[in-house]
Amino acid sequence: MRVPIIAGNWKMNNTISESLRLIDGIKKNKLNEEVEKVVAVPFTNLSEVKKVLEGTDIKLAAQNMHWENKGAYTGEVSPLMLKEIGVDYCIIGHSERRQYFNETDESVNKKIKSALKYNIKPILCVGETLEERENGEEETVVKEQVLKALEGVDKDDVKDMVIAYEPIWAIGTGKTASSDDANHMCGFIRKTVGEKYDKDTKLSIRIQYGGSVKPNTIKELMSKKEIDGALVGGASLVAEDFVKLVNF
Ligand code: PGA
């Protein structure tokens, strides 16, 4: 059985003190123990958030990383640095990074391999634009993103990864994909992974849906067979909403 995974992607929100308040708000509640919970916080807040997560079963994620472990890359953060803080997951290839910071399938692939090498579990983001969906190209685009990201990645490592299907037109727009469309695309990603690897890998990898997930839409999404969790932006910034998402 795949363990459901709900991850909050805070993006560029929350100073350290705001982060601590948000975590405090979340910790005041009883959280579903059968769901894996993750908060993906800005680099500057990782160490402090790690401390206050001590004694909880909430996991910590970074939102990006460089693939090299050190060197002359001004402004970048390495997997070694994340590892020392105790980061469990790292979001890789989020569409905002692809769109605004020139991330390519090649850099995403390097980051995935590097994260796995340092035992940081990647949350790989893939998804099509509105134009691609309107042209009926969503499967072609997503398949290419998945296969390029996984080039040269070992079968045993893939099982630890999470893939988030996030149609770009649904991110931060209030428009979510219908639960059937989201389920279809998550199933399509699973099939793609199965074709590249094997049945076992296909059945173990967890696939999330992301894009305007809210407390009132999570239950329906999570009832779908292929959807193992959600990657949530906006709604993860409010403690009460994040708690509702986790306790769907
Ligand atoms: P959203 O963001 O929930 O605000 O649409 C999702 C994401 O970008 O991961």
Image (tube, grey):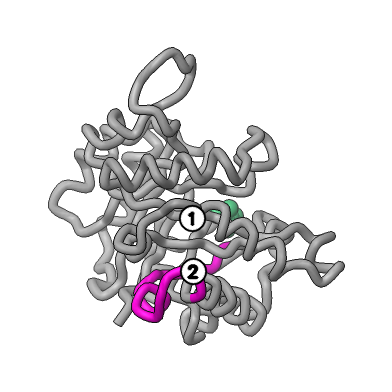
Disc 2 within 8 angstroms of ligand 1 (CB) = no
For image coordinates 28% across by 48% down, the residue present is 88
Can residue 206 be seen in this snapshot? yes
Q: Quadrant of the C terminus?
A: bottom left
Please tell me whether residue 23 is drawn above or below residue 75 in the rendered image: below
Is residue 181 left or right of 57 when viewed as pictured?
A: right
Say if 188 sits above or below 102 in the image: below
Q: Give the crowd class for mark 2: few <14, some 14-19, many >=20 residues within 10 Å.
A: some
Question: In screen coordinates, is 173 left or right of 186?
Answer: right
Q: Residues within 10 Å of mark 1 (few under 14, many from 20)?
A: many
Q: Do the residues under discs 2 and 1 have CB atoms within 8 angstroms?
A: yes
The residue at which mark 2 appears reads as 196
Residue 154, image x and y in percent?
36, 57
- Specify the quadrant of the image occupied by residue 19: top left
Magenta range is 195-210
> Helix, strand, or loop for circle 1?
loop
Q: Quadrant of the N terminus?
A: bottom left
User: As shown in the figure, which amino acid type bears the numbered disc 2?
Assistant: Lys
Q: Which residue is mark 1?
A: 150
Rendered location of residue 149, percent (x, y): 53, 52
Q: Which tag, 2 or 1, sits closer to the chain's start?
A: 1
Residue 233 in percent (x, y) is at 54, 54
